[in-house]
Amino acid sequence: MKRGSIVAGVLLLVLAIAVWIGSASFTSDSAYFPRAVAAAMLVLTILMLMENRTVRDEVVFDWEKFNYRRTAIIFVITSVYLVLLAYVGFLITTPICLLLMMQVLEKGDWKLKILSSVITTASIYVVFQVMLDVPLPGWSF
Amino acid sequence: MELLLHGFATVLQPQILLVLIAGTLGGIIIGSLPGLTATMGVALLTPLTFSLPPATGLVMLCGIYCGAIYGGSISAILIRTPGTPAAAATVFDGNELAKKGLAGKALGISAIASCSGGVFSALCLTFIAPELARVALSFSSPEYFAMGLLGLSIVASISGDYVVRGLLSACIGLLVGLIGLDNLNGYPRFTLDLVDLLNGVSFIPVLIGLFAVSEALRTTESMLKTAHVDFKLSGVLPSFSELRGCAKTILKSSAIGTMIGIIPATGGDIAAFLAYGEAKRSSKDGDKFGTGVLEGVAAPEAANNGVTGGALIPLMTLGIPGDAVTAIFLGALMLQGLRPGPLLFKDNADLVYAIFAGMLLANIIFLLFGLFAIKYIARVINIPKPILTPIIFILCIVGSYSINNSLFDLLIMMFFGILGYLMDKFKFPVSPIVLALILGPMVEGEFRRSLLLSSGSYAIFFTRPICVAILTLTVFSIVGAYIQQRKKHRML
């Protein structure tokens, strides 16, 4: 964990300093609380880094077990879906996105996956848009 | 009593009852699926409630909460994998009973014990909360500030072996809570000149990101084969003598669960293990625990559902959430334009008692599902993970979008999903972010209001006895948790 803690510690220190500097332009009463939180963060991060000296080195990411490719592909599919959602609409993009994700996670059994994608999309549409009158993103009927 | 009857009359309206039944069933299904915790379930389904009238939406959440905690026992018994952390202790005897071919009986006693624990705690909630709220009516800004700080100090105790990291997570939550216009003077803070951030960061997308998206991302790492359950679930109803044998354990465990629930920062898992330990210690057949005895299922199940009502007591009376689920509950109340605390009992008594009635009825409803429909419900465990995980992703997206119909909220959700995922890898607990995000604005607001009352003098916090007592408790809570963690590290 040592290396992971150092990376996290540095990021937190940068954040705390950024908050301190960022609040300089606030009115004095608006700046009080952010500065108190930034100061607490600084102290706690230093405490964490000091604690870290006595902790044995642990693995943060277990690369052998971690299927980063699959997680990355899922992330990309979700991101593309979010972009397309506004332009193409919920009813068309959702079953395609679901099907792609299901296929990435486990190949095969197309029939079950197509059926699950369509039923899920239809169910969400009926519950949100029809029953609860909550609009879904983008163009939908 | 009249108010409670009025609460029942509200909840028994066909539309609300139907929503309660659907929520409870949804909760059972989510709870029974390993990897989907009660927190994730409540976070995912909260967006469904905000378009409903307050009583209907909140009663639905009661159903989801109670149903999910009970549902955890189904997979604990059938596939030795607790559906929620609160059902971890149920595995010991529940799965042993299943191996002996008594899965049906184990599920039956689990439903009865869970219902008893839930009803007991809901009754405590109904009768203790109004009294506590009356006391809290005398609180002013300094006391509320101290209560908020105490709530934040809970972070130290829910962070396990990582107290400092938990406090750092809370700082991140406090910073997120600061984004937007200053509540007192309207000054924009950390908005990065984005109009979407002027009203602050929406709570629900943060919640869904931290609890659901991060969990779904973790699931994609290793797609384990889904267990296929093929149990013959017969004989679900326990005999009268079996029930009599468990009655004392159920009652005692219900009381343990309720008390643990009232103490902030504890939770169903701690209550279940404590009750299991106590049942084992006091039972005549203590040495048989772990080999498949009904009391070994009844004790943790009565206790973990006992927590549900207990945990709502500090939330409803003081506005202090004790854990992640109650923090979401608080968020749901705020989405409906309500502020938990003593004034809620005064201004919205109808709604408060509808929630109490909803809690009581949710327990009865999952008992009926557990006794008469478990054969069908248990099949959800067979849903393959590669089918389920993408569905969760889509529900996260729809849920986050539907709060404000904002695509910006989807970015917030994704950001916090990745943040939650990375924080878990770096051993930073995520629950403190939610607690701090909720409590931060309250702590800051009450602090500044107190200073306005005292014309800028800090003495106001040290001259009021209740405020001093709460602040002392806060200091003890943080220092105690830190010393405990240091001792533990030295022992290792």
Image (spheres, helix red, strand yellow):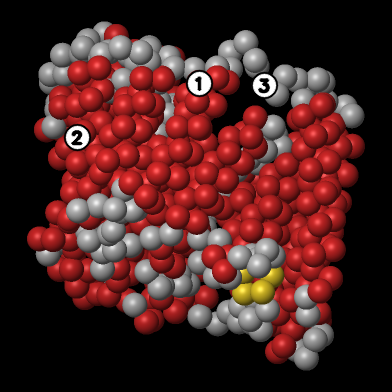
The residue at the point 75 percent across, 89 percent down is: B454
Write the residue at 65% across / 30% down.
Answer: B425
Alpha carbons under labels 2 and 3: distance apart: 36 Å
Report whether mark 2 lies on the same chain as mark 1. yes
Instruction: Say which residue label 1 marks.
Output: A70
What residue would you read off at disc 2? A119
- Which residue does the image show at 72% across and 49% down from the upper left? B167
Is B238 positioned to the left or the right of B353 in the image? Answer: left
Q: Give amino acid for label 1.
A: Arg
**Front in this rendered view, residue B248 or B223:** B223
Image quarter of the N terminus of chain A: top right
Residue B486 visible within the image: no
| Label 2 residue SS | helix
First in residue order: circle 2 vs circle 3: 3
Q: According to the image, label 3 marks what residue?
A: A61
User: Position of B423 compared to B459: left or right?
Assistant: left
